[in-house]
Image (cartoon, grey):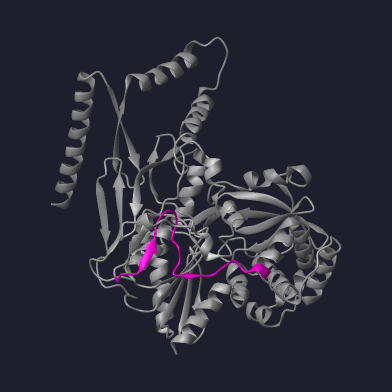
Amino acid sequence: MKSLYTFLNFFGAILAILLVFAIGFRAGQKYDIAVDENNDYVPISYSINEQKMRRLMSLIDNHYVDQVNTDSLIDNTIQYIMSNLDPHSVYLDQKVSKQMDQKMRGYYIGIGMEYVIFHDTLFVTRVNTNSPNSNLLQLGDRIIKVNDSIVTGAETENAHKLIQGEPNTFVKLSILRNHKNIEIKAQRAIIPDGTITDSYMLNDSLGYIKLKRFGEHSYTEFKSSLRNLKSKGMKVLVFDLRGNSGGLMSVAEKITDEFLTNNQLIVFTKDAKEKKKRYYATNKGDFDGEPLYVLIDEESASASEIVAGAIQDNDAGTIVGRRSFGKGLVQREISLGDGTKLRLTTARYYTPSGRSIQKPYINGKGKDYMKDITNRYLRGEMFFLDSIKVPDSLKYKTAKGRTVYGGGGIIPDVFVPLDSIQYSVWYYTYRDKKHFDEKIVNYIDQNKLKFKNIKEEDYIAFFNPKPLAEELISEIEGREIHWRPEEEEYFEALIKATIANYVYGDQVSQKIWIKQDPMLKRITALEKEKQ
C-alpha cells in the first residue's frame, strides 16, 4: 500500500510538471524545474529577456571568433546579479557548496589535523582522536612536502588543496619531527564535527551548553546533552549562542520546542505575497518551565535569533548579553544542476510578538551592511545599553506584557557590556596578532613533550602562564603600551586559553575562559540574588 501511494505521488508530480510545460509552451514561455535542500520541486519560468541571456551564451559558445570560457562568464554574471540583491542571497560554487553541505551534516573530509603556518611552515597543533591518523601525526610536526610537492615558504597556501581529497584515499606527507625527516601515508577520512562544543555543569545546579551552529544533527546532540546534564542535577540551564551565525531553521524550531509547551508560537514567516506560515511548539518540552538563560552577542544570527526571540516573547527564559546580529531573512537553497547552488531569500521571519529581527539594508550594498557591527563599536553600543535607540513604533509586548524591541536584532533582557579590560587586551594583542601567535606556537614547540604528558585537567589546574605573559607584556610595552594589574591577569588567561585551544581543543580552552566570562559572572550573580 505504501509503495502504491509513493508511485501515485510520483506519477502525480510528473503529470503536474508536464502540465506546466504544456501551458508554458502554449503561452510562448519556457519552463524548467529545480530542486531545493528538501528535495522539493521549484518551478522556473523564463521570460523573453531571460531566454535572450541563454541565446547570448549559446551564440558566444558556438560562434564567437576567439575561444572563451563561457562557464566563467556565466559564473561571473550570476555573482554580479546576486550581489545586487539583499546581503544574504548568494551564489555557491561547487567547492563552497560541497563544504557547506559537509558542515551542515556535521563532518568534514580530511586527515584529522589542525595546523598553523609558523615561519612559513605547516606546524601541526592538534590531531583529532577520531582520525585514522591519530597515531601517525603528532603535536609539533612540521609538514615539508605533500605528495612530493614542497609546501614551505610561498607554497604553504597550496598545502590545504593538496591534502584534500576523497575519503579512503591516501596522501604522502614528508614531516620534520625532532630534527628527523620521516614519511607517512595519511588516510583521508570522514571526520565527525559536532556542533555542541561544550556541555558540563558550572556548579551543582547550573548547567552549560554551547552550540556553534544549527546543523542536521544539532537537535539530537542537544537532547543528549540536556538529558545528561539533568541526570547530573541541573536545575538551571545556560544555553550559549554567542558567535552562532545560524544554520537550519527547522533545527532551531526543534530545539526551541524543548523550552516551550504545546501550541506556543515559535516563529512565523511572510513571503513576497505576504502569505504567512506559522510554526508552533508540538508538545511539552524537556525543559519547559525550567529556569533558562540564553546568551547572545553581535555574532548571534538567524537561527540563533529565532531561538532567542521565541524564548523572549513567550517569557520562557532570560536573554543575556548584547544585541544580536539582526538577520531575519529566510533563504531557500536551490540546486542549479551542476553542483552549484543559490541561497535565495524567499521570506522574512518574525518573532511570536510580530517583531522583524532583520536590520535595515539596501539591495546591492552588502559592504555597507557588513559595517554595522563596526558602527556599533563607534556608537558605544557595545559598552552602553542606552546607545541603542528604538522608536516607540518598534516596541512590542511579550506573552506576559513585558516590552521588547524590534528594528534589528534581539535586544537582551539583561545587557552585559563588552568588558573594557578585555577589550583593551584583545585590541593590543590582535593589533600585533602575528607576533602573539608566533610566540605562543614557538612556546608550544619548545615544550611539546611536556604538553604531550600533561592531562587536560592538570593543565587547567596547574599550568602557570605568568612567565610567558611577562615576556610578552615587556615586548608589548616596548611599543609604548602600559598594562594595569587586572589587564595582566586577563592577558595570562588569554595565553593559557590560547595554548589550550591549540593543544587540547576548544572545550578545554572554554573551561579556562569561563572564569573570565562577564556574562557567566552576571548569571551567577542573578542566581545568588534569587536565594
Q: Position of residue 514 (x, y in %)?
A: 59, 75
Decide which of 203, 362 is in the foreground and name it: 362
In this rendering, the answer to whether 100 lies above or below 282 is: above
Give the residue drawn at x 54%, y 76%.
Answer: 520
Give the residue drawn at x 61%, y 67%.
Answer: 505
Q: Can residue 70 be seen in this view?
A: yes
Q: Which residue lies furthest to the left in this view?
A: 1
Decide which of 299, 332 is in the foreground and name it: 299
Which corner quadrant of the image does residue 338 belong to? top left
Range covered by the magenta-colored residues? 400-421
- In the rendered image, residue 58 lying in the magenta stretch gets the answer no
Horizontal relation, residue 136 to residue 242: left or right: right
Quadrant in which the C terminus appears: bottom left
- Callout count: 0
Q: Where is residue 358 in the image (x, y as percent from the top left)?
A: 42, 51
In this rendering, the answer to whether 116 lies above or below 71 is: below
Q: Position of residue 219 (x, y in %)?
A: 38, 64
In this rendering, the answer to whether 372 lies above or below 233 is: above
Give the residue drawn at x 33%, y 19%.
Answer: 48
Q: Which residue lies furthest to the bottom in this view?
A: 531
Q: Residue furthest right?
A: 478
Q: Is residue 138 visible?
A: no
Q: Which residue lies furthest to the front in this view?
A: 392
Give the residue drawn at x 57%, y 12%.
Answer: 66
Q: Position of residue 511 (x, y in %)?
A: 59, 75
